[in-house]
């Protein structure tokens, strides 16, 4: 695997690292190389590595690249690659949902492409006489936060009441309730810190305060190391709660090294050395 001097410095730094990566600078190449090194660290242990990305497409890309160097069973046994929603669902919410009164009897995940989701949102829009533009905004509706422009507070509460009464949880609800669980039960983040030797978090500039709260609770036990990657100048998710300033705040909190950055455009290099 061919690496630049910046990438090598990022990969072989043994402590927490906050890495600024501009577009086309070989970020995914660097993350994959770091994952391969992390595997060497945990190979003879029961610990694993968490790699959190922003989209399913990014998950697929990292898994594809890892498969060029490792057997699928090998990296699936040691590396948990997924979105923040997937990580929180499988590692926090699903094992502990019964601790929340709203989900003591079980739960069902409601995705935006689910017909039930569409029917619920359409019903709330109709009952509250909302503009049709409100439909897409329900995907970024988040508890304890002001609703988007086209959704009234009453409509938001009607939506959440329906979900709660029917044991539904949407994607943003997964993050919200995972943060509630980690805040209320310290053994949950302590257990995650014991289970995962590393957290590699991509697109950190679009991370929300609730996501950082979850990561902070895990970091507080000092059992886990972090590589956070992002470019505060490229944040595009402020409408959904993304806060680029949290990258510096979290880096400071975990005493991460922050003087390395990936620059230049290595698009052609990535094609030659994927």
Image (cartoon, helix red, strand yellow):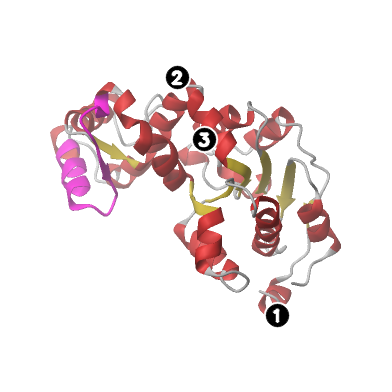
Work out how far the residue at label 1 is from the one at label 3, CA to CA, in angstroms: 35 Å
For the residue pair 232 and 225, the one nearer the viewer reads as 225
Residue 30 x, y percent position in the rendering: 70, 60
Residue 122 x, y percent position in the rendering: 17, 44
Residue 7 x, y percent position in the rendering: 78, 59
Magenta span:
102-124
Q: Does the magenta stretch include residue 108?
A: yes
Q: At 29% across and 42% down in the image, what residue appears?
A: 134
Identify the residue at the far bottom of this view.
Answer: 272
Mark 3 highlights which residue? 211
Residue 109 x, y percent position in the rendering: 28, 43
Would you say 54 lies left or right of 99 here?
Answer: right
The disc label shown at residue 272, or none: 1
Which tag, 3 or 2, sits closer to the chain's start? 2
Q: What element carries label 2?
A: helix
Would you say 217 lies left or right of 162 here?
Answer: right
Would you say 157 lies left or right of 35 here?
Answer: left
Q: Is mark 1 on a helix, strand or loop?
A: helix
Mark 2 highlights which residue? 184
Which tag, 1 or 3, sits closer to the chain's start? 3
Would you say 198 lies left or right of 137 here?
Answer: right
């Amino acid at each position: 695997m061919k690496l630049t001097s910046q990438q090598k410095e990022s990969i072989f730094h043994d402590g927490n690292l906050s890495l600024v990566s501009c577009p086309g600078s070989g970020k995914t190449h660097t993350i994959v190389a770091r994952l391969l090194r992390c595997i060497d660290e945990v190979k003879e242990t029961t610990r694993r590595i968490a790699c959190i990305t922003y989209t399913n497409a990014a998950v697929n890309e990292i898994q594809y690249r890892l498969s060029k160097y490792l057997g699928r069973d090998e990296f699936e046994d040691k590396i948990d690659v997924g979105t923040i929603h997937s990580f929180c669902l499988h590692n926090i919410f699903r094992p502990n949902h019964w601790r929340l009164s709203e989900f003591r009897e079980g739960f069902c995940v409601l995705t935006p492409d689910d017909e039930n989701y569409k029917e619920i949102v359409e019903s709330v829009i109709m009952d509250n006489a909302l503009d049709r533009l409100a439909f897409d905004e329900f995907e970024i509706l988040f508890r304890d936060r002001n609703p988007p422009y086209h959704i009234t507070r009453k409509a938001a509460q009607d939506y959440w009441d329906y979900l709660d009464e029917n044991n539904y949880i949407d994607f943003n609800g997964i993050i919200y309730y995972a943060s509630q669980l980690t805040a209320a039960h310290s053994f949950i983040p302590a257990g995650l810190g014991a289970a995962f030797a590393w957290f590699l978090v991509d697109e950190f500039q679009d991370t929300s305060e609730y996501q950082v709260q979850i990561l902070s609770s895990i970091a507080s036990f000092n059992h886990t190391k972090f590589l956070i990657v992002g470019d505060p100048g490229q944040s595009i998710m402020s409408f959904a709660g993304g806060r680029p300033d949290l990258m510096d705040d979290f880096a400071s909190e975990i005493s991460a090294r922050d003087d390395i950055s990936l620059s230049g455009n290595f698009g052609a290099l990535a094609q030659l050395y994927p």
